[in-house]
Image (spheres, helix red, strand yellow):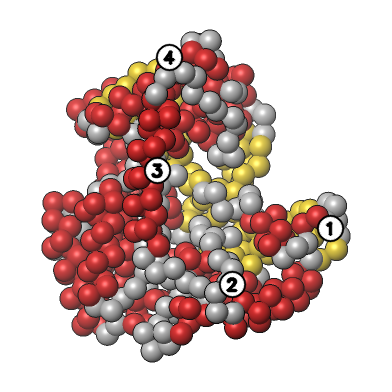
Amino acid sequence: MAKIVFMGAGSTVFAKNVIGDCMLTPSLKESEIALYDIDPIRLKESKMVMDNLNENFNAGRAVIKAYCGISQRRAALKGAGYVVNAIQVGGYKPSTVIDFEIPRKYGLRQTIGDTLGIGGIFRGLRTMPVVLDFARDMEAVCPDAWFLNYTNPMSMLTGVLLQATSIKTVGLCHSVEGCAPTVLKQLGMLEEVKNLNWKIAGINHQAWLLEVRDGKKDLYPEMKRRAEKLLNVWRKSGTNKHSNMVRLYMMLKFGYYITESSEHNAEYNMYFIKRNYPGLIKEFNIPLDEYLKRCVSQVAGWKKQRKEILGGGIVAHERSGEYGAGIIEALETNKPIRIGGNVLNKGFITNLPPKAVVEVPCLVYGAGIEGSYIGDLPEQLAGLNRAMINVQQLTIEAALTGKKEAIYHAAYLDPHTASELSLDEIADMCDDLIKAHGKMLPKYR
């Protein structure tokens, strides 16, 4: 019987997806499920939902227990085979608000701020100490468990565990599997394709659709033709604009399509959010402060969902598209599956650094999770990846050494931040962010 621990179980909807999928998986129906959170109210609500699922979809076969607070963390982790991580340190308020408001005072605008940029750096700085604490507890009470990380900044959190602990870790994201079908649908090509296959590799949120084919036919020439035609219309349009213009434009300029959304990629480089070119925001339909708006919407949406989920009756669930249950099943039963996983670059992408966390096709089976050899990326793509990796590695260095200088260096090298602010402004902004975070960050020297 597998023991599965869900860290951040107060994220009820996401926990429901992963745990519900496990209950719909024959080999995992009798699992022991430990729900862990530091919020007793949200944890209690999640426990009610999981109990409902267990009774109505699983004949009560799973054993579900709840653990609240740091004092119960080791008890939750003891004997685990799998630890699913979905925490958010600091929440929307105050942390996410701080990540956006202070940079805005310096004239630095963001869209999402959870992966790269100044927002991603500070989200990483406050989250890495927590996941390192998880890892230390795991080394003590479940040293052979797999850590399945869903939390952003994905590459930083996965990387710090792989570099500084003995815990087996893989990072999981939603952006790979739907990439090719989604862009083909947007371009009006999906229904024409009979035998779709693709190859994706790079880093999280900036992996590349290296190949996309219908059987042996290369679909890229037609994709680019249609993208250019549509972009010409959308860029001139006053109101009828598409939400994916940045990625399509980047494909035309760099030759390949990117896995993650346009709102994310608008802030990962120096090309789109620029004070001296304010027209680009409207031209490419870039949603500034988007994550703040989503957080407000999610809070309101959860209040409605909470009433529906906890209002009695049977909690509904269908198999989601999350990798979690499939990975656990493959590791338990030795029935292989293929995923897009985030792993340490052990020669998989030969022109990216060995300390980098890369997103590559992975085989999951009884012996573990193994990345695939890709070779060199096209050099222009590797260059864009390296710019992100520089920031990730320096933020990890700051978390592991406690040196404030490494925070400055990370921010100095961030493409969007460096394109908008001077070195002195960046350092002052980092100081203000450190002060605003207070006890949410460790002491930096």
Residues at marks 3 and 1, CA–CA distance in whole angstroms = 37 Å
Tell me the crowding category of disc 4: few under 14, some 14 to 19, or many 20 or more residues within 10 angstroms, Cα based: some
Residues at marks 2 and 4, CA–CA distance in whole angstroms = 51 Å
Q: Earlier in the sequence, mark 4 or mark 1?
A: 4
Residues at marks 2 and 1, CA–CA distance in whole angstroms = 26 Å
Residue 272 vs 77, above or below: the answer is below
Tell me the crowding category of disc 2: few under 14, some 14 to 19, or many 20 or more residues within 10 angstroms, Cα based: few
Label 2 or label 1, whichever lies nearer to me, is 2
Q: Look at the image and tell me whether residue 38 can be seen.
A: yes
Identified at 25% across, 82% down, the residue is 423
Residue marked by disc 2: 240
Q: Amino acid at mark 2?
A: Asn
Q: Secondary structure at mark 4?
A: strand
Q: Secondary structure at mark 2?
A: loop
- Residue 310, horizontal then vertical, whole percent: 39, 25
Identified at 44% across, 44% down, the residue is 150
- Residue 260, horizontal then vertical, whole percent: 54, 60
Quarter location, residue 367? top right
Q: Nearer the viewer, residue 273 or 212?
A: 273
Residue marked by disc 1: 192
Residues at marks 4 and 1, CA–CA distance in whole angstroms = 47 Å
Residue 434 vs 150, above or below: the answer is below
The C terminus, quarter of image: bottom left
Label 3 or label 1, whichever lies nearer to me, is 3
Q: Which mark is residue 301?
A: 3
Residues at marks 2 and 3, CA–CA distance in whole angstroms = 27 Å
Q: Amino acid at mark 4?
A: Val
Q: Earlier in the sequence, mark 2 or mark 4?
A: 4
Residue marked by disc 4: 63
Quarter location, residue 338? top right
Q: Amino acid at mark 3?
A: Gly
Labels 3 & 1 near each other (Cβ < 8 A):
no
